[in-house]
Image (spheres, rainbow, N blue to C red):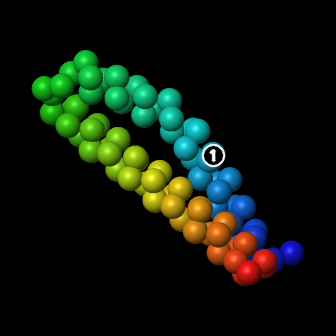
Amino acid sequence: MDLLLWITIGFVITGFVALVSMKRGMERKVAFIKANTESEESSTKARFVIRWIVSTTAWGIVSMILVVWWFHKNFG
């Protein structure tokens, strides 16, 4: 099998596992931020949540690029 295919599958599965495992913690952090908008800890948690959103978006974009690249390489 193609190495690019295995890299793509591994990247997507690893990302999904990380996303699912961190989701509940992010929901708790967002609930804390909503309840305590003025605290310093809320600001720290907000930065962490924003970084998580950016990282998740980047993972999704890279996953799509890898899938398109694999299809282009094999069927294009």
Q: Residue at x 57, y 47 (%)?
A: 18
Work out which quarter of the rendered image holds the N terminus and state it.
bottom right
Q: Is residue 51 above or below residue 7?
A: above
Tag 1 secondary structure: helix
Expressed as whole percent of the image width and height from the top left, the position of residue 32 reads 30, 23
Farthest top residue in view: 35
Side (left or right) of 66 relative to 44: right
Work out which quarter of the rendered image holds the C terminus and state it.
bottom right
The quadrant holding residue 28 is top left
Expressed as whole percent of the image width and height from the top left, the position of residue 14 reads 64, 54
Expressed as whole percent of the image width and height from the top left, the position of residue 56 reads 47, 51
Side (left or right) of 14 relative to 47: right
Residue type at the position of mark 1: Val
Farthest right residue in view: 1
Residue at mark 1: 17
The number of numbered discs placed on residues in the rendered structure image is 1
Q: Is residue 24 above or below residue 59?
A: above
Q: Which residue is drawn at 71% across and 74% down?
A: 70
Q: Nearer the viewer, residue 44 or 57?
A: 57
Farthest front residue in view: 76
Side (left or right) of 41 relative to 67: left
